[in-house]
């Protein structure tokens, strides 16, 4: 803990607790992944064993790829996530710039209004959102999901980015103004590149709940052509609930892309959290 | 600077251009539907027309035994769901954060990364993965308990009315423990070294230092985590839906407000979907969440002293 009392038993105990919790955190994911590569017999015979050449079997994956249209689901999830992310970052950064850079009447009120959405979940408006999407013919389109997720992501994005943008040096922006840059150029050329780390943090926070959401795909876009991976996996597993190979393979397919992305960006994400981006 | 010069300047259109897209999308897709939903709860479809009925939907919700039993059951389950989170998730999160923040700990970034992994997975994956692991057919959980000699404790937890909700709450805790861990870890790191050194000079070390110095300093973070947990719990749906289905079995014992709203709004099996009753339940959820957030903002946050370093 500190220099005066740090001792061997203390640090052994700390590692013991952390290792046991790490095992608890990773165990279920590990069991699902290893068993998805095994034949049905060994899934039940020796669930804790990693696949060996004798028990290795891809039958579950073959089933998933032929029965479910996972390629389409992945594509849908990808389109929805990337498009929403783009709009959240662009619109969020623009609004954050206006709030942090200019003093105008109603500035704080506008900030509060936009921050409301951090605490009040958008799901509570579902009844009217569905009504609106039906009226505008957007049910079962990816556009509906993109609109909803953009609105959902904006409050937190504006909140975090406003704090970061007020830290950008005024001298730099004023130098730009003296050189005759328009306000738009100052934003896109000078400020945006400087807040890139904060944008990355916002991107990760926005992306995870969108990719993982079940509620809105289920309600706004449940058709076969617009299913996202989360909904697709949910329905597929519901149908094949007794086919353990297929269920485990579908789960693994849903886990793997997120896991790989996380391992690539985890440094960024953790730095974002611990730098006080979210207080 | 700009404020003083503002009256003489031409109207600053760029402010509107910068704000407009975010404000428009947010207002149109989030704020308007939110109030639209509150409004729907005061209407009802009577003989084809959409008529204003005042608080009739709420009278049905609380007066009709079929509805009120479901509502109070869901609300109570939701409260239990929240209590388990507060009692289990936060202490574990604080413990892990305290261990991780000790300066000489090796491998701390590995632990952080690994313990956060469940948090990034979707509820669907988490729900099914645990359903499989706890399943008596597969036998992973009984085998593990057998290793430590506790096999007799095993029952199909998710299938028993008295355990299912607690089991699901613990699964949700397992998934989200990374969030309090990270936020408290960040708060602990931001405590300046001088404070710690001063404590050491006064002979406050080890556990006493944690309880008397560090914990009071991270209380504001614990407050924020609690209100975030509250909002997330009273709005939860996905985990119960993926693990137990829309009927939130066995015998509605895991029904929370989110699944109750889903069934009321869309209908399920024998129940016919009812938009206005759905809106009435959403309104109740809105009021509950609003009350919680206001309590936090006006009672708790103002009392917690914030320390500026």
Image (cartoon, coloured by chain):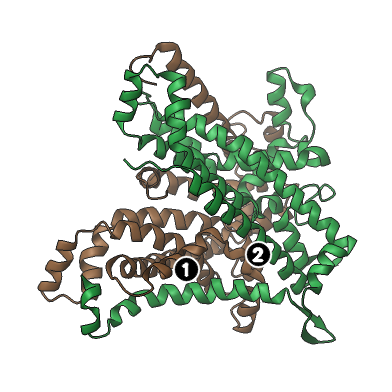
Chain colours: A brown, B green
Residue for point 26% across, 56% down: A167
- The answer to whether any part of residue A150 appears in the image is yes
- Packing grade of label 2 (10 A; few <14, some 14-19, many >=20) is some
Chain identifier of the residue bearing label 1 in the image: A
| Placement of B70 over or under A270, stated as above or below | below
Residue at which label 2 appears: A218
For image coordinates 84% across by 59% down, the residue present is: B68
Q: What kind of element bears circle 2?
A: helix
Q: Nearer the viewer, residue B158 or B50?
A: B50
Spot occupied by residue A139 in the image (x, y as percentages of width and height): 62, 76
Q: Quadrant of residue A88?
A: bottom left
Q: Residues within 10 Å of mark 1 (few under 14, many from 20)?
A: some
Check the image and report above or below for B183 versus A188. above
The residue lying toward the viewer, choosing from A99 and A51, is A99
The answer to whether one can see residue B113 in this image is no
Q: Provide the residue designation for mark 1.
A: A113
């Amino acid at each position: 803990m500190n220099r005066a009392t740090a001792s061997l038993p203390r640090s052994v105990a700390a590692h013991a607790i952390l290792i046991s919790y790490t095992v608890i955190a990773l165990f279920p994911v590990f069991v699902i992944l290893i068993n998805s590569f095994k034949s049905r017999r060994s899934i039940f015979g020796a669930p804790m064993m990693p696949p060996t050449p004798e028990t290795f079997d891809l039958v579950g994956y073959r089933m998933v790829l032929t029965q479910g249209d996972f390629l389409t689901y992945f594509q849908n999830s990808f389109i929805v996530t990337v498009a929403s992310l783009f709009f959240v970052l662009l619109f969020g950064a623009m609004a954050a710039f206006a709030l942090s850079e200019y003093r105008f009447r109603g500035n704080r009120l506008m900030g509060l209004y936009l921050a409301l959405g951090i605490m009040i979940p958008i799901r509570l408006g579902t009844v009217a959102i569905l009504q609106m999407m039906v009226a505008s013919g957007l049910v079962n389109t990816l556009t509906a999901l993109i609109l909803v997720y953009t609105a959902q992501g904006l409050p937190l994005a504006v909140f975090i980015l406003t704090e970061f943008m007020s830290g950008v040096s005024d001298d730099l922006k004023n130098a730009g103004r003296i050189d005759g840059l328009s306000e738009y150029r100052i934003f896109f050329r000078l400020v945006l590149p400087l807040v890139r780390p904060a944008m990355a943090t916002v991107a990760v926070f926005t992306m995870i709940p969108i990719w993982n959401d079940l509620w809105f795909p289920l309600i706004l876009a449940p058709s076969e052509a617009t299913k996202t991976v989360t909904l697709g996996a949910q329905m597929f597993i519901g149908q094949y609930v007794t086919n353990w190979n297929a269920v485990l393979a579908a789960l693994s397919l849903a886990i793997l892309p997120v896991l790989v992305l996380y391992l690539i960006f985890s440094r960024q994400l953790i730095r974002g959290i611990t730098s006080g981006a979210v207080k | 600077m700009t404020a003083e010069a503002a009256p003489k300047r031409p109207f600053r259109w760029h402010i509107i251009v910068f704000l407009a897209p975010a404000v428009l999308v947010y207002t149109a897709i989030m704020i308007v539907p939110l109030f639209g939903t509150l409004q729907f709860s005061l209407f009802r479809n009577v003989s084809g027309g959409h008529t204003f009925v005042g608080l009739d939907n709420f009278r049905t919700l609380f007066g009709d035994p079929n509805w009120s039993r479901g509502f109070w059951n869901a609300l109570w389950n939701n409260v239990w769901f929240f209590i388990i989170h507060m009692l289990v998730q936060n202490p574990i999160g604080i413990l892990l954060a305290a261990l991780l923040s000790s300066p000489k700990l090796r491998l701390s970034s590995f632990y952080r990364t690994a313990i956060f992994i469940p948090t990034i997975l979707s509820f669907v994956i988490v729900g099914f993965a645990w359903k499989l692991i706890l399943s008596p057919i597969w036998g992973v959980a009984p085998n593990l308990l057998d290793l430590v000699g506790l096999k007799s404790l095993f029952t199909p937890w998710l299938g028993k009315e008295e355990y299912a909700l607690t089991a699901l709450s613990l699964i949700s805790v397992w998934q989200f423990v990374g969030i309090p861990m990270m936020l408290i870890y960040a708060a602990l790191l931001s405590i300046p070294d001088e404070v710690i050194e001063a404590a050491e000079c006064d002979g406050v070390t080890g556990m006493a230092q944690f309880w008397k110095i560090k914990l009071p300093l991270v209380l504001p973070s614990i407050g924020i985590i609690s209100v975030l947990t509250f909002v997330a719990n009273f709005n939860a749906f996905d985990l119960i839906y993926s693990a137990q289905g829309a009927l939130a079995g066995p015998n509605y014992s895991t029904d929370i407000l989110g699944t109750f709203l889903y069934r009321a709004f869309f209908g399920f099996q024998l129940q016919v979907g009812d938009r206005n009753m759905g809106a009435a339940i959403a309104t109740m959820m809105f009021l509950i969440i609003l009350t919680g957030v206001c309590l936090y903002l006006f009672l708790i946050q103002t009392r917690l002293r914030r320390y500026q370093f």
